Amino acid sequence: MDGAFSTTDLHRLDEAIRDARFAAAAPASVLLSPLAPHGEAAALTERECVFDHCAVLLFPTTLAEGLRHLRERGLAPLPTVPSTVVRGRLAERHGLDPAQCEIHITRLRLELPDGRRHAAVEVFLFPRDSAAFGERIEAVETTAGFENHTAYVVGRPSAPVLRRLVTAWQDEAGLLWEGGGHNPHEGGPAGSTVLYFVRDERHPALRRRFELHCAGDQREATADLPRSAQAVRRAYRAWPAAAQDTARPTTG
């Protein structure tokens, strides 16, 4: 590998940038599809949420080299913050010690079709010089894209709104609610809460993971909603096989 990123990672970064520009202008009915007819998922999402970002996990030679490459491309990476939730997801998936799993988050500012300049690509950086890095981890994550997702921000989060969104996304879009996490390092003094969703393998689509972001600690708002850990595990077990048949979206 001659530069900060592998050729594969550079291609995946370009895909994430194209995808974010598309998603910024696309209606929720397109991004969430397929949807059950006559439901409220799309309208509720349009009313209560705004598209925020698409995400990708990359493996730079070092954190400094990765950020330098992004700056030299004119992508204006924001200052990094440590990952809490993705670090935990990777540690669980690969049997890593979370304390050794060095994951950094940055955002890339893009010129969007509506004229906004917005930090519309979230990049998780797992440096190759991290103690927990391994080529097997890189191969699995690069092939499957488990951390690729499309994210919305909930404008005015409240328990009723969040509960309706979780229920509508599950019942009408086939998006299984995985749970959520609170990151005290992002989103202001109170941090931010993220709710995670994975596509039920019985409702295949190009976009396989979604997130809802909310300011503050909103974990109690949805704590008692039902979650099927078995269905989530089944969706992830089916993911590698499905990934062979479904290309990563660049225009939809």
Image (cartoon, rainbow, N blue to C red):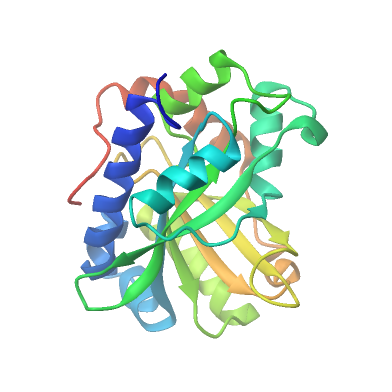
**Closer to the camera in the image, 162 or 156:** 156
Q: Position of residue 141 (x, y in %)?
A: 49, 27
Whether residue 9 is visible here, answered yes or no, is: yes
**Residue under the image location 30 percent in, 52 percent down:** 17
Q: Does residue 58 appear to the left or right of 202 in the view shown? A: right
Residue 235 to residue 171: above or below = above
Image coords of residue 182 (percent x, y): 72, 61
Outermost residue toward the top? 136
Depth order, front residue of 100/168: 100
Placement of the N terminus among the 4 image quadrants: top left
Picture residue at 20% right of the left edge, 51% below the top: 252
Please give left or right for residue 43 compared with residue 154 in the image. Answer: left
Q: Is residue 176 above or below residue 144?
A: below
Residue 191 locus on image (x, y percent)? 71, 70
Regarding residue 36, the answer to whether it shows in the image is: no
Q: In which quarter of the image is residue 33?
A: bottom left
Q: Is residue 1 left or right of residue 100?
A: left
Q: Report x, y in % for residue 125.
A: 55, 41
Indicate whether 100 appears above or below 147. Answer: above
Q: Which residue is drawn at 50% across and 82% down?
A: 155
Which quadrant holds residue 239?
top left
Residue drawn at x 28%, y 67% is 24
